[in-house]
Image (cartoon, coloured by chain):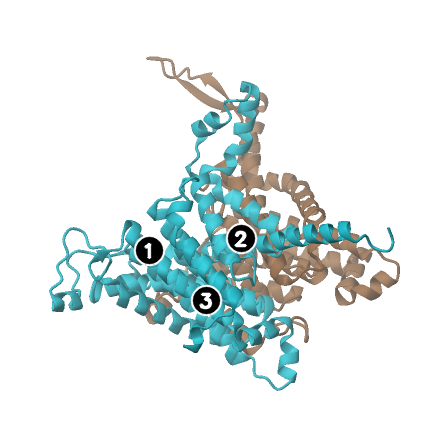
């Protein structure tokens, strides 16, 4: 089929990505990150960031409210679990579609403005949803406690097919429980499909139009090109990615809470995208991987672990190091996150991918200039 | 009638805080062209100036409690009380108003350091990058405060004299049911004074004139040989002081915790947008307006018709304003309109 046809480089990229993701349990072993819970997080947030990048990376529209779709995806999934079936396929589909629906509404309104106004509009919508989820919508969202799956929920479809749940209900994929490694592989497959779609979008005329909008929207308009439908599509697609990521969160752990919609959560995905590299294919995944990995490592440290770590130093230095490092780890992980955020935006706005390419270019140009010295030398 | 008056009063003190923060935001945006997401953090830092000052003032010594004779009991007596007796106790009581004296130089310093250390490198960068870097800064400031003061709200009471409530209703010839805490009235008056001072400073001093000229046409002013950038730096410092003072005085109303700034920031941005980006009068007007609107929306009668309206009213107004009148209530034509 034509849509599956890729150029040679892209095929290599796609294969490399798929293999790298599927083999994560093996190559992450040495750095102690190869346990299912964390791997699931990698895949889920990777998907979230890849979707966010379709909007921010291609069109340059900075949304500060993308976590709303994450929350909607989670809530819908849990409700599908409660009402229809513990099978994850309808749950993910419904979660994605409903998030898409909300994205149409929010996007239609927000995209009437550009720049900082767009950011504030999306932020306003996010805050509204968050506040409502906590207050009036409590019958749907179960407020602060969070929505969870119960044993005696109706589950119409399961009842119809005579599927019986034993113990506390968990999501399943036609009988395979979505916890531990099976859960990770399910997320990984969804992630790979998501990456493939994002690759197709980047290489398509549609993606080209989005990039053109980013570089100069006015010029596009002057040539008689209506940019709005394209922007809306980009917004909806990235919203659906976020919804899907939210669904997967609920699939691997069937509960949903309003804090997923808070604007700090939206900020986190922005950071992931920027850290990896805005507008690059692989960057967002890289950013998500790094942030979730370091979050995991850093939050685990406590004071005694730090003392162990620096125990090779003389005791005065050891205490000094512990006092310096201590605010950054454990509960203070957000401090590291904020610092990282600033450092990246200040020194490397293109993210890690840009950093690496710059490094390679310099090496290459160094090599070239060494071989054929320029006329001035 | 009583209820309406009460709601207006309720809205005004919150509106005062919104207006003060929004004023600083607009000032910074109008002069430096920078969208500062760390402005809420400055409000929070101001509040924690008061907390720190309170900590310093109540620095205590353990003294044996003579009134208990069964066992050795100790009580903490602040040094100030030991040294100055009655005067010391009074000083501790007046800690919040007094900490204004501490907050002004501290906030000015923080503002100047922030501007010279970080913001000045972002004049020419895109708004998205400005938002991101200041957002990161806000997180950093917030977390530093959290690691020093913990995550719980810290009560900082107002002086005892103004702890009660004023009977506003009797003043206007209405029933006695309209009572209102003194401190909130003070906050309101304080907000008006600070706003008035900022406007007077901009309107009646040479410095203010140059700043206004720079806001209107930066290039021409710098062509006249005036160092606009340095003045704008000072304006950033002033904005920081205004936000800080708003924070100091707000502590008796709402015990500060580390994310108080973020809560106010999002709303203040909405206020700025509603008032009109770059319009100082708009920011102040919208601040009070939205404060009052919010307190009306939280009336039970209104909530019975539109449940949950109090949670979203401000955002709803912002969405409507942005879609129908993008330059805001009092914004100038053509300033950041698209």
Number of callouts in the render? Answer: 3
- Observer-side mark, 2 or 3, equals 3
Residue at left offset 48%, top offset 65%: A11
Which one is in front, B328 or A285? Answer: A285
Q: Position of residue B65 (x, y in %)?
A: 42, 17
- Quadrant of image for the N terminus of chain B: bottom left
Real-space CA distance between mark 1 and mark 3, rounded to the nearest whole angstrom: 33 Å
Q: Please, what secondary structure does the residue beneath circle 1 have? A: helix
Tell me if residue B1 can be seen.
Answer: no
Q: Position of residue A80 (x, y in %)?
A: 25, 65
Q: Please, what secondary structure does the residue beneath circle 3 have? A: helix
Real-space CA distance between mark 1 and mark 2, rounded to the nearest whole angstrom: 61 Å
Q: Which mark is residue A185?
A: 1
Q: Which mark is residue B185?
A: 2
Which one is in front, A271 or B106? Answer: A271
Q: Are marks 1 and 2 on the same chain?
A: no
Letter of the chain in brown = B
- Quadrant of image for the C terminus of chain B: bottom right
- Quick check: B76 above or below A17? above
Q: Earlier in the sequence, mark 1 or mark 3?
A: 3
- Observer-side mark, 1 or 3, equals 1
Q: Which residue in the protein does label 3 denote?
A: A125
- Quick check: B312 above or below B109? below
């Amino acid at each position: 089929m034509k849509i599956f046809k890729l150029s040679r480089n892209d095929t290599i990229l796609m294969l490399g990505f798929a293999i790298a993701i599927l083999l994560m349990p093996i190559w992450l072993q040495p750095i102690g990150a190869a346990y299912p819970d964390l791997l699931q997080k990698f895949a889920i947030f990777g998907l979230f960031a890849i979707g966010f990048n379709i909007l921010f990376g291609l069109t340059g529209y900075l949304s500060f409210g993308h976590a709303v779709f994450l929350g909607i995806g989670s809530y819908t999934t849990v409700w599908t679990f409660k009402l229809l079936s513990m099978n994850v396929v309808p749950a993910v589909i419904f979660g994605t579609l409903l998030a898409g629906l909300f994205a149409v509404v929010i996007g239609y309104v927000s995209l009437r403005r550009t720049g900082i106004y767009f950011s504030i509009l999306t932020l306003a919508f996010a805050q509204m949803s968050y506040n409502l989820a906590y207050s009036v919508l409590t019958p749907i969202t179960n407020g602060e406690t969070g929505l969870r799956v119960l044993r005696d929920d109706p589950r119409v479809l399961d009842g119809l097919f005579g599927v019986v749940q034993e113990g506390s209900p968990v999501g399943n994929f036609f009988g395979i429980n979505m916890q531990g490694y099976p859960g990770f592989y399910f997320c990984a497959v969804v992630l790979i499909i998501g990456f493939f779609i994002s690759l197709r979008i980047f290489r398509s005329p549609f993606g080209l139009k989005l990039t053109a909008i980013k570089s100069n929207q006015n010029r596009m308009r002057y040539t008689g090109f209506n940019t709005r439908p394209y922007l809306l599509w980009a917004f909806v697609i990235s919203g659906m990615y976020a919804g899907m990521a939210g669904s997967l969160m609920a699939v691997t752990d069937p509960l949903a809470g309003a804090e997923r919609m808070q604007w700090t959560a939206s900020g986190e995905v922005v950071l992931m995208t920027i850290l990896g590299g805005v507008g690059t294919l692989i960057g967002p995944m890289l950013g998500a991987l790094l942030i979730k990995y370091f979050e995991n490592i850093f939050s685990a440290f406590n004071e005694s672990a730090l003392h162990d770590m620096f125990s090779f130093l003389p005791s005065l230095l050891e205490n000094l190091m512990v006092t310096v490092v201590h605010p950054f780890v454990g509960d203070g992980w957000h401090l590291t996150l904020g610092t990282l955020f600033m450092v990246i935006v200040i020194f490397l706005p293109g993210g890690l991918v840009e950093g690496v390419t710059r490094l390679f270019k310099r090496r290459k140009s160094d090599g070239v200039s060494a071989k054929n010295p320029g006329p001035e030398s | 009638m009583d209820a309406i008056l009460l709601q207006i009063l309720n809205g005004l003190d919150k509106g005062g805080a919104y207006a003060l923060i929004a004023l600083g935001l607009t000032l910074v945006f109008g002069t430096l062209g920078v969208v500062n997401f760390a402005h809420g953090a400055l409000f929070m830092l101001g509040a924690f100036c008061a907390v720190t000052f309170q900590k310093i003032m109540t620095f205590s010594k353990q003294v044996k409690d003579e009134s208990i004779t069964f066992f050795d009991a100790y009580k903490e007596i602040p040094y100030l009380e030991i040294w100055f007796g009655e005067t010391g106790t009074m000083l501790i009581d007046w800690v919040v108003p007094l900490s204004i004296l501490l907050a002004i130089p501290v906030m000015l310093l923080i503002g100047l350091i922030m501007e010279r250390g970080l913001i000045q490198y972002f004049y020419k960068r895109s708004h998205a990058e400005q938002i991101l870097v200041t957002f990161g800064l806000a997180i950093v400031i917030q977390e530093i405060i959290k690691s020093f003061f913990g995550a719980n709200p810290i009560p900082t009471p107002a002086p005892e004299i103004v702890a009660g409530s004023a009977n506003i209703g009797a003043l206007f010839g209405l029933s006695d049911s309209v009572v209102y805490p003194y401190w909130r009235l003070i906050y309101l008056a304080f907000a008006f004074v600070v706003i008035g001072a900022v406007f007077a400073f901009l309107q009646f001093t040479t410095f203010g004139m140059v700043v206004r000229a720079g806001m209107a046409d930066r290039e021409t002013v710098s062509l006249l040989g005036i160092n606009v950038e340095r003045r704008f730096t000072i304006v950033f410092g002033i904005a920081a002081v205004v936000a800080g003072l708003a924070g100091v005085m707000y502590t008796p109303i709402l015990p500060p915790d580390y994310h108080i700034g973020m809560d106010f920031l999002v709303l203040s941005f909405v206020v700025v947008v509603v008032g009109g980006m770059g319009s100082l009068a708009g920011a102040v007007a919208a601040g009070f307006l939205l404060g009052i609107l919010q307190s009306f929306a939280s009336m039970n009668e209104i909530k019975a018709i539109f449940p949950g309206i109090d949670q979203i009213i401000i955002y709803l107004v912002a969405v409507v304003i942005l879609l129908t009148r993008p330059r805001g209530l009092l914004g100038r034509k053509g300033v950041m309109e698209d």
